[in-house]
Amino acid sequence: MIKQEDKYIVEELQHAIKVMHDTVTSANLPELHLRVEGHVFKTKNVEKGWALSQERAEVISQQIVAGGSPENILHPKGYGASRPIGPKSEANRRVELHVMTEEEVANWGKGKAIHPL
C-alpha cells in the first residue's frame, strides 16, 4: 500500500514515465523498458523480505500503468534486503527504477537477467 503522503511522488512518476515512453516512441527509438526494483531492510525472515520487496515493486508498477504507461515496459523485481544503501532501515525500504539495456530485456525471465551492481 502506498502512503498518502507518497501519492504525489507516484503521480509524478506516472507522468514522467508516460512522457518518456511517448517521446521514445515518437522518435522511433528502441522501446523504453524499466526495471522496477523493490527493496526492504534486513529482517529475520528472509523469505518474507523477498516477498515484500517483490510486492512493493509490483504495486509501484501497477500504479505507473494506472497513469497510462504500457504494462509491457515495466519489469518488477524484488531484491529483499540484498542491496542495502545504508545502515538505517528506512533508507533500505525503497523502490528504484532503472532503464534496462536491450540485453537485459532480451534475457528477462529466462533465468539469465543481468543486474548490474
Image: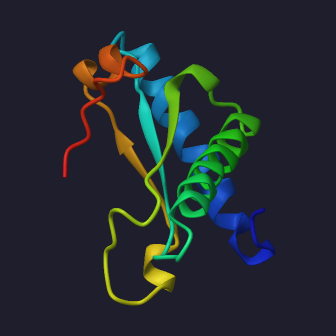
Q: Nearer the viewer, residue 107 or 67?
A: 107
Image location (x, y in percent) of residue 13: 58, 51
Against 69, is 91 above or below?
below
Taking the spot 32% from the left edge, 64% from the top edge, the residue there is: 83
Image location (x, y in percent) of residue 52: 63, 58
Against 49, is 3 above or below?
below
Query: Is there any visible trace of residue 10 in the rendered image?
Result: yes
Q: Which residue lies furthest to the left in this view?
A: 117
Which quadrant would residue 49 be assigned to in this image? bottom right
Image location (x, y in percent) of residue 97: 43, 49
Taking the spot 56% from the left edge, 69% from the top edge, the residue there is: 45
Q: Which residue lies furthest to the bottom in this view?
A: 88
Image location (x, y in percent) of residue 37: 46, 50
Taking the spot 46% from the left edge, 34% from the top edge, the residue there is: 20
How many numbered dots are placed on residues in this image?
0
Indicate left or right for 90 with 52 as reference: left
Taking the spot 69% from the left edge, 34% from the top edge, the residue there is: 65
